[in-house]
Image (cartoon, rainbow, N blue to C red):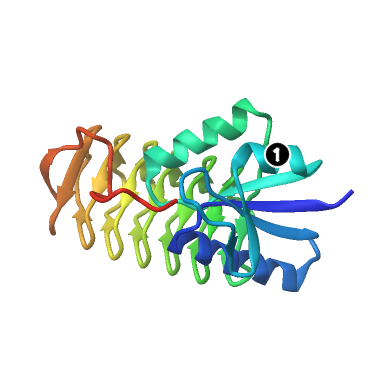
């Protein structure tokens, strides 16, 4: 039986995830083929790989796993539910250049990019995306569908809720909680607890407004 990896998305993030998948294949022969999935755009090929609609893909391959390669937390949640409802396995992709302590617990569908550092007793829930050079301190919990941006540093004993977006170069001090559906803008440094559904900016981070539409990207994202 031939295992196939489907990368859901055809934007820049999908191409980055494809790089991780190729790096994994250089270490271990995990998949016989890699394809892309796009249910919006009319595209048939990307990076020399075929592009399928979701339902066409799951009908075409008997042994199939999915990687969600979009950067919008709410959309990651939506695609996660689509996969779960159709009993599609989610692939966890970890770049070979990542350091992860053996005490770390990693959920399904997690993607961890190059040069990330994950220290002791960390819990990374399902469908989290960690971009390059992220540093995750000790005793941290990261909720499902969250995206932690490049060069972000998370202080020890933090609890990060579901569908949180931490922009690049953002960070937190130790012993605090960030609620669900929070956006921390690029460069924001969090020094105190953040409630649900807000957007924070600056250093020290302050609440700018409610995250009413649950969107990070103002323009429609190319999945």
Q: Quarter-wise, where is residue 189 in the image? A: bottom left
**Image height check: is 189 above or below 68?**
below
- Write the residue at 32% across / 34% down: 180
Q: Quarter-wise, where is residue 85 in the image? A: top right
Percent x, y for residue 39?
51, 43
In the picture, measured across the screen, residue 171 lies left or right of residue 205, that is right
- Write the residue at 75% across / 52% down: 4
For mark 1, does the 10 Å Cα neighbourhood hold few (<14), some (14 to 19), or many (20 or more) residues? Answer: some
Q: Check disc 1 and report the residue beneath it.
A: 58
In the picture, measured across the screen, residue 119 lies left or right of residue 146, that is right
Q: Secondary structure at mark 1?
A: helix
Percent x, y for residue 150?
37, 65
Q: Nearer the viewer, residue 151 or 138?
A: 151
- Residue farthest toward the right in the current orientation of the protein: 1
Q: Nearer the viewer, residue 108 or 219?
A: 219
Is any atom of residue 102 visible in this view?
yes
In the picture, measured across the screen, residue 82 lies left or right of residue 209, that is right
Is any atom of residue 144 visible in this view?
no
Percent x, y for residue 185?
22, 55
Percent x, y for residue 93?
62, 56
- Write the residue at 53% across / 30% down: 81
- Residue farthest toward the top in the current orientation of the protein: 85
* Numbered circles on residues, count: 1
């Amino acid at each position: 039986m031939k295992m196939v990896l489907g990368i859901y998305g055809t934007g820049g993030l999908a191409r980055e995830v494809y790089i991780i998948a190729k790096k994994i294949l250089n270490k271990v022969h995990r998949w016989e083929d890699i394809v892309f999935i796009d249910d919006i755009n009319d595209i048939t090929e990307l990076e020399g790989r075929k592009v399928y609609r979701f339902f066409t893909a799951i009908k075409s391959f008997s042994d199939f796993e999915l990687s969600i390669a979009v950067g919008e937390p709410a959309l990651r949640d939506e695609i996660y539910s689509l996969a779960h409802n159709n009993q599609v396995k989610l692939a966890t992709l970890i770049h070979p250049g990542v350091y992860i302590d053996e005490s770390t617990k990693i959920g399904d569908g997690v993607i961890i990019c190059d040069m990330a550092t994950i220290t002791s007793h960390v819990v990374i829930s399902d469908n989290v995306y960690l971009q390059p050079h992220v540093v995750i301190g000790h005793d941290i919990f990261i909720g499902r569908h969250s995206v932690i941006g490049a060069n972000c540093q998370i202080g020890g004993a933090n609890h990060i809720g579901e569908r949180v977006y931490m922009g690049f170069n953002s960070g937190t001090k130790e012993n605090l909680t960030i609620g669900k559906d929070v956006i921390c803008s690029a460069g924001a440094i969090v020094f105190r607890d953040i409630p649900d559904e807000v957007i924070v900016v600056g250093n020290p981070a302050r609440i700018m407004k409610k995250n009413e539409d649950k969107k990070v990207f103002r323009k429609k994202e190319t999945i």
